[in-house]
Image (cartoon, rainbow, N blue to C red):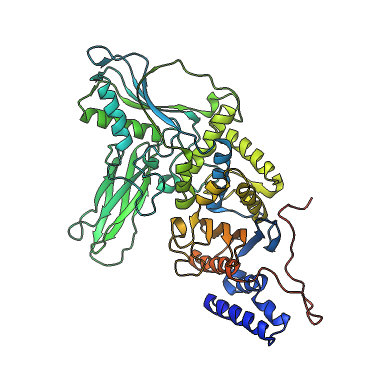
Amino acid sequence: MNSFRCYALAAFGALALAAGSLNSAEVALFTLAEAIDEVLESPTAHRSFWGVHIAELKSGRVLYERNSEKLFTPASNQKLLSTALAISRLGPDHRYTTSLVSEAAIGNDGVLQGDLVLVGGGDPNLSARILPYNSTRSFRNDLLLPISELAAQAVQSGLKRIEGSIVGDDTRYVRQPHGSGWSIDDPKWGYGAPISALSFNDNVVTMRVLPGRVAGQPARVEFKPDVPYFTFSNRTRTMATRTVAQRLDLDNQTGIGNLMLWGQISVRSRGRNIEVAVDNPALFAAVALRERLAELGVEISGETRARHRLPLDVPDLKGGTIEEEDEKNAIAMIQSGPLSEGLSVINKVSQNLHAEMLLREVGYTRRGVGSFEAGLGEMELLLREAGINKWQYRLRDASGLSRQNLISPQATVQLLAHMAKSEHGDLYRASLAVAGEDGTLDWRFSRSPVRGKISAKTGTLTGVSALSGYAQTQDGRDLVFSIYVNNSAAPNSYVRRLIDRIAEAMITAPPATPSPTPEQTTEPTATGSLKPPA
């Protein structure tokens, strides 16, 4: 039954009931439980593993559940946990400072005798990103904006020459660049950019790839931002045909900063944008700084390098005290906006790097170690506060890229309900994508009667789809829900359509099955509370 027919029949059923022409068993066809069961009886749904949990936010009454205590790979719904942790432990006003420091002061002649160190403060938005979240435009034109500001401050302080190196320092966080369980190809693409306390432009360079002027030529390639970080090899070929035998692909596994683009592109192509992850973010930021300082006339005698804190250098990754370095001369610094402005970037756009950085920032701030393990310890405490037991989840990263993450729909709903009732509940809910309006839901539900009535986090991996968040019914009730689909061989677009039908039913269908008549033998869908069984 398609969505339009569901709405029409539901409306017809309500009118007919008022006229006394339908009995309660017939009306039950149009309740929430029946509407969802119908979706899950489709052939596409049968070839997937589904978990659904829907409850009223105020009362906690469960309206529908299926496999709600089973464990599912959540994909980017994992970010619901990461942002909940950040807002709970860091607070909405938390800010980051990125600074330029040196061991020696700048001499009267403008010469710095020593290294100039760019110290990462964990700012996820050390970029030209427009904040608060802008649904129509993400970045300002000058992608080097924060690096330019730091370089300008350094020159204003009198810097003319550096008798030393430019150093990118990301030692605030332990060097754990990738999450456990990430796919082998993830680190080369923008969505799998490595994690670092010194992250500039999301640790991504965008390659604009255009066909050659004529068939047989290599593709034309431009980099944004234009930072001389990669050693680039162009092994592409422009083809005269509309289709190609080898699509474009990357190889950046041959060494730090080495990048090869290969494959074919049609001469008729309008071009492609490819987001490439930089493999050493601290070095990338240092290279960008060196370029801007040189453009401003600063002479630099030394090399450009990075400084990291390796796991073996930390006595206890779960928490402890990191020895503070000797105080240095601050030559320049910039401060981020408040954490509250960045949450929407993570949840609306599904920004993986930022979610990972938040977990480590919590570990650094609360336990003295910017590691995954320290952040995980704080996450486990938060989940316990929300009434979630350890058997309801397994966490291997903060972004959802890892297929080793597991959580139940019931536990997800419990966390959402806990956050809704917290002091930061409104901010947390506002950070989610809105159906038919913005973020990863801007094109979903855009022509549906539920547009604007769902605030949720999407999640997608191959064979995995998810949608969890808040909804408001047509009669004004607030719902909290989680829908997970795993082990699906169907195209994600097919599965998304089924998820959307369930979401629409939450808004439009009556909440519960009427009392059964003596002729009815099936029981209504189980109801209960948000709490797990003992």
Tell which residue pokes out farthest to the left in this image. Answer: 213
In the image, residue 470 above or below residue 395 = below
Residue 81 location (% of width, % of height): 58, 46
The structure residue drawn at horizontal position 55% and vertical position 30%, both measured from the top left corner, is 365
Q: Is residue 401 visible?
A: yes
The quarter of the picture where the N terminus appears is bottom right
In the image, residue 148 above or below residue 434 = above
In the image, residue 310 above or below residue 133 = above
Residue 87 location (% of width, % of height): 55, 40
Tell which residue pokes out farthest to the top in this image. Answer: 108
Q: Nearer the viewer, residue 478 or 389?
A: 478
Q: Nearer the viewer, residue 262 or 394?
A: 394
Residue 190 location (% of width, % of height): 40, 47
Residue 73 location (% of width, % of height): 59, 53
Q: Is residue 178 visible?
A: no
The structure residue drawn at horizontal position 54% and vertical position 51%, both measured from the top left corner, is 429
